[in-house]
Image (cartoon, rainbow, N blue to C red):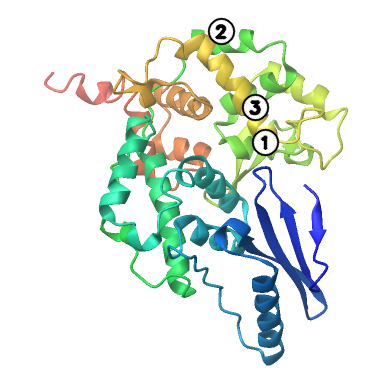
Amino acid sequence: MKIHKSKRFRGIYHIELKNSDLSYYITYKVDGKLIKQKIGLKSKGINENVCNRIRTETIANNLRGTPTPAPIIKRKHSNVTLNDLADFYFDSQNGKSTHKWLGKFNLRIRNSIGEKDVAHIDTKTLESFRQSLIKANLAPSTTNCYIDIISAIFNYGIRNETYNGNNPTRLLRKLKVDNRRERFLSKSEIIALLNYIGDDPTLFLFTKLALSTGARFQTILNIKKMHVDLENRIISLCDFKNESHYNGYITDDDLFDVLSNRMKVIGASDYLIREDGVRDLTKYISRKMSSAFYDLFNYELDPTTDKDYRKRKVVIHTLRHTMLSHLGLKGVSPFEIKQLSNHKSLSMVERYVKLNPESGREKVEGLYG
């Protein structure tokens, strides 16, 4: 998409979108730093005159040290739409999580209730929208996330006086979420998985690390050569969820050999899990592993009829659950499982301890003898 500079006003640009709409931007400097700000779409009533007014006011307010209020878009036949409010919200945010939220908004909100006037979006509207997500077989946690996105957009509009009203999500109770996964791989299933992906060095190393350390997805992707102590068979792990570090262990010779070969050809600061030509390694690993899981374990599951579909489905997190479950089956103590998994509390590892079929046997045998 080509950027077009205004011939009438300074610091005003527009981009022609694929749908022939125009997206307007302004630029100005603050303390010598060039700032680019999206103003809005032509279809929403924005033009060069509006942009020039906003730019002039913005520059004047910066010189006076006065914050520039967010522009309130008014259209001929309606007030601000949810899409209008969302555009201002996402333009003001930074971060990976915000980028994911924008993707979700564009996927299921923008074209469903996005064009509605925010003044006409009430609890009934949102409940109807939520029911559509449920009918689409979205998990309760995912459905709650969509409502959280809408709530954040409304709160932003209220705080910045872009929207004068109440947040309609406040009266919606969140759906109950059961995050527990009961499925873990048996020893024979582990062998089947490793044989299936054995020809792919990246997937094989990823799976062996997951089954040996029990680490979460992003933790494994962020292991570098410098984090591996081959001599002592220790891997330093970063837990992004709990914002802490802990140790994992190289549990078998196959993993040791694969790591040794990989570490010979990479630098100290290079990641162990890498694939030439792949920009988004998270998506690449997710898609490859999902395909393997489907072919081996998930092909018989039906999300439309199986009420325990989520608990029975094998996913990447199942590898962590598998490692910890087998620790429980071997009778490893709750404290040791907590230490190896880096869970926050002992209560979070109780389900693994209960898997041991011999658990408590020694306390019962000979009880009355």
CB under 8 Å between discs 2 and 3:
no
Q: Position of residue 355 (x, y in %)?
A: 34, 23
Label 1–label 3 contact, CB within 8 A: yes
Q: Identify which residue, 281 or 255, lies in the foreground.
A: 281
Q: Residues within 10 Å of mark 2 (few under 14, many from 20)?
A: some
Residue visible at 54% across and 27% down?
316
Name the spot of residue 106 as percent of width and height, x first: 53, 44
Specify whether residue 80 is in view. yes
Query: Looking at this view, is 2 or 143 the one in front?
Result: 2
Residue underneath mark 1: 221
- Residue at image x 33%, y 42%? 130
Q: Which mark is residue 285?
A: 3
Q: Earlier in the sequence, mark 1 or mark 2?
A: 2
Q: Amino acid at mark 1?
A: Leu
Closer to viewer: mark 2 or mark 3: 3
Q: Quadrant of residue 181?
A: top left
Q: Give the residue number, with chain letter if any, for mark 2.
A: 192
